Amino acid sequence: MIMTSAMRSLLLATALLAAAATAALGQAQRDEVIASPTLRANVTVSSDVVRIGDVIDNAGPTAQIAIYRAPDLGTVGTLSTAQVIAALRQHQVIGVDTRELKSITVTRLSRSIDSKDIENQVAQALENRHGLGAAANLSLTFDREVQGLQLDASNTGALQPVAVRFDARSGRFDVTFAIGNDSNVSATKLRFTGSAVETVEAAVLVRGVERNEVLKSSDVVVERRPKAEVGNDGATRDRAVGMQSRRQLRAGQAIRNADLAKPDLVTRDQAVTLIYETAGLYLTLRGKAIEGGTEGDVVNVINLQSKRTVSGVVVGRGQVAVSAPSPRLPAQVETPAPTLAPTRESLPSEKISQARPPLANSPAATSPVALAANDHVPVSRKAE
């Protein structure tokens, strides 16, 4: 009885060991199947080389071995499967499952910076420096044509201006940017040089116009021109259309407010209507303008009925308002009131000295009679 139990225990232990061994062998076989290297159809790299671990899964300890140079930044390359298998065999990587792929693609990651972004960054770096205006009003000319840049994908930092120089006299700029990265290497530096000019929107003539010519809508376009060319007197398109040129202007010229005037509503030798209006009365006559003028100007006009020249105010196209001359009153001549000779009784006693006749040798004998101020006493011819 005892021997039978021991044998049963031994048989059970043997069965358990056999089952465990079988399970371990199956797991090892499954692990071996999972660990089999498999070729990738699409490969993406961020460095300048392609490693074994990039092209196959389950590369094991050989994953960091470089086998190809990566394509240029932002580009895609192609490798045939035969080329990849040959390169792997050189490093004792065999048994690769190719999944019947004929070739694989390799894409090099990068950071793209558009040329327009570069121009905007330079303009913002120069904004409001040394008398320059807003970045949107700056026109930049680079010494070398600015093209889109492809940077290493690790350069994730913003473009930070670290050196900005501008010469207001020559308009030259020199701007350097630094771009930080995820690695511990120094920042990437980008330098741009060229010329900067501040511009403004200006009304520009499409064709040449003569003096006193009225500008039409088709004659004027809006362009950005250097502020130094236009100055602070640049006219807008809305202001220019319908106005009259003060002088001859050439095609392509930026229009200034000083070049414009209100259009003449009356021109020289033009037939006009003379208008006379007063309370309860409205008269019109035919006339001929001797000179031109715009609204509100005073011009001379010949009245064709009376053949006389009159002056009036331009009030509309071909219309001149005249007013009747106000009657002049005759000049009043002021005649002085007659002065009567005062009698002795009418003169104040304090204004005339009633001294006795002086002696012949007295000084008063040769002195005139003393009169008070502002008294008008007639003097006889004899006394004179």
Image (tube, grey):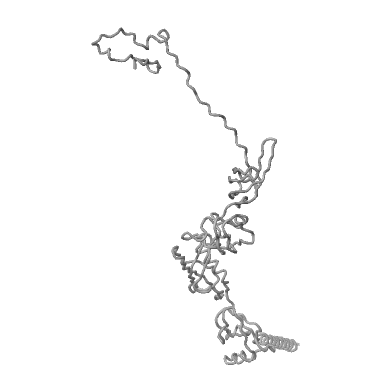
Please give left or right for residue 44 compared with residue 198 in the image.
Answer: right
- At a point 62% along the width and 87% down the height, the residue shown is 79
User: Which is more toward the observer, 140 or 341?
Assistant: 341
Position of residue 29 measured from the top left corner of the image (x, y, whole percent): 68, 88
Furthest toward the left, the residue is: 361
Position of residue 201 measured from the top left corner of the image (x, y, whole percent): 57, 60
Q: Is residue 147 above or below residue 351?
A: below
Q: Is residue 270 above or below residue 340?
A: below
Please give left or right for residue 127 compared with residue 89 in the image.
Answer: left
- Count of marks overlaid on the render: 0
User: Which is more toward the observer, 107 or 185?
Assistant: 107
Furthest toward the front, the residue is: 382
Please give left or right for residue 31 compared with residue 68 in the image.
Answer: right
Q: Is residue 374 above or below residue 9?
A: above
- At a point 48% along the width and 19% down the height, the residue shown is 337
User: Which is more toward the observer, 34 or 157?
Assistant: 157
- At a point 24% along the width and 11% down the height, the residue shown is 362
Q: Quadrant of residue 146?
A: bottom right
Q: Point out the image quarter for the N terminus.
A: bottom right
Position of residue 141 measured from the top left corner of the image (x, y, whole percent): 51, 69
Please give left or right for residue 357 compared with residue 44 in the image.
Answer: left
- At a point 49% along the width and 74% down the height, the residue shown is 185
Q: Point out the image quarter for the C terminus.
A: top left
User: Which is more toward the observer, 275 or 263?
Assistant: 275
Position of residue 182 measured from the top left corner of the image (x, y, whole percent): 53, 72
